[in-house]
Image: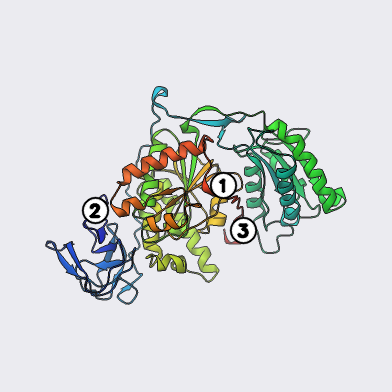
Amino acid sequence: MSSTTHFNEAAVVLDERDNVAVARQSLSAGTVVKGAPGATGTSDLTLLDAVEPGHRFATVSVAKGDLVRQYGEPIGTSLGIHPGARIDHGNMTDEVPIVRELPAHLDNPGPTTPSIEKQLKFDGFLRSDGRTGTRNWVLVIPTSMCASHEAQQIATISEFQHWSVEQHPNVDGVSAIPHGRGCGTPDGDNITTILRVLTAYATHPNVGGVVFLELGCEKTGQDLLRSWMRKQGLLSENEQTVGGRPARWIGIQQAGGTRNAIAQGLEAVAELLPITNESVRSPRPISELTLGVECGGSDGFSGISANPALGRASDLLIGQGGTVILSEVPEFCGAEHLLAHRARDRMVGKEVYAMVDWYRDRAARLGKDLNMNPSPGNIAGGLLNVTIKSLGAIAKGGTTPVQGTMDYGCPTPRRGLNLMQGPGYDQESVPGLVASGATAVIFTTGRGTTIGNAICPVIKLATNTAIYERMQGDLDLNTGTIIDGDETIDRVGARVFERLREISSGHAKSCAEETGHREFNIWAPDPLSL
């Protein structure tokens, strides 16, 4: 794919192979678009229809049955399209060729880490397991939905009664992860996934101390969780530390009910705060950062501005020896061949295809189709189908080889770019990235998305200037300057990378942190569908 080409103030063509352009502003029918690329060079083109920002119009005639192309890739099949016509489902189907071949000898060498003298630094919390965090939380973990109310109460009251920046300057606060999973799991939840995610949060580099809370009779209670942790060598003999972090255990039924359990929880947090405060930031190689990349509330500009700019930042981090996690597997659909061909070897390439096939099969069992992925907001913003969305979405992962794949919430197998199985739902996808080890998340949005995470800074990139100006309290950086023609993708990518260093070092908070967004959820599909 060639670099983005702004051919005039009205529209942009993304690749020399494209037969469509994307409107940069509202264009009315009859507008003359000057210098539009065509089959025989450039010429003026008169629009036959009105075209909204982020939507497409044909730059040449596309015969019935021919492929419509954006990013140099097929995004649909023409029903017969005239030059200047708005592209929509009246003149284009969503059908694209399925490409699944792999080179016989796929070999993409992995990234190399620069010498110590050239490695950039950030200020992080070095943990006993060798990983480095960007935050230092006391975390309250309910083992099931049945203890979620009490967990939230303990965290909320603790921040008013026991924690303050003045008393505990090295602690970011007390957070909880209430969720709707566990108990008897009558909905077919995968208990293994629940245990894995809860354990990953308890031992996350951004957590310095943890309080566990159970009702007392659920399947996913503390006995099962302790057994899981013990098998992984994470639980101390006296059960007072988990992964080297101080831990406390409370049962609601054993305590005598809600009020007593909350009181015990408050006492436990008060004990843990001074211990957690003993951890201090120190300069660490930026190679110890793990970045999760996400998009939500996407629009037609996502794949032109914010996602490729984030991709540049991803490449910069990986070039320093860092790790990036890309997920939202339904949004690989239609673009999975591009990721597979970037795999480090043929085996990983096959794993990329298997991830998409698993998700497609699971959706079919539920009577769904991945083409249903774009939301009404996505479609209104110009993302007519999942292929267009996917081609823009995978740009978040940059251009480096795919080093490996893993299940939801599992550790990354290698440094560099890794792909995690997971849904396109932000509220479940971001927690999965964090459970897999992301210590910071960068989240692109065109329509305006506000969510954060319970223990991880979530940095928001606006795809267009209009939404950034409307929601500056929720969006950290504006990448709409790329669409406006004021900045290059490389320049914005470098700016995103520096903001990542600043926020990861604790020199600033993300907007989601400032506004108190601490979302958490678990994606735990029925194991029978795995």
Give me the C-alpha separation between circle 3 and circle 1. Answer: 38 Å
In the image, residue 78 lies at what x, y percent? 27, 72
In the image, residue 111 lies at what x, y percent? 38, 35
What numbered label is drawn on residue 5? 2
Look at the image and tell me in which quarter the C terminus lies. bottom right
Looking at the image, tell me whether mark 1 or mark 2 is earlier in sequence order.
2
Closer to us: 134 or 146: 134
On screen, residue 199 above or below 362? above
In the image, residue 237 lies at what x, y percent? 76, 32
Closer to us: 404 or 490: 490
Mark 3 surroundings: few (<14), some (14-19) or many (≥20) residues within 10 A: few
Label 1, on which residue?
A: 514
Give me the C-alpha separation between circle 3 and circle 2. Answer: 46 Å
Q: Secondary structure at mark 2?
A: strand
Is 134 left, or right, of 12 in this rendering?
Answer: right
The amino acid type of the residue labelled 1 equals Glu
Label 3, on which residue?
A: 527
Find residue 47 and report its image quarter.
bottom left
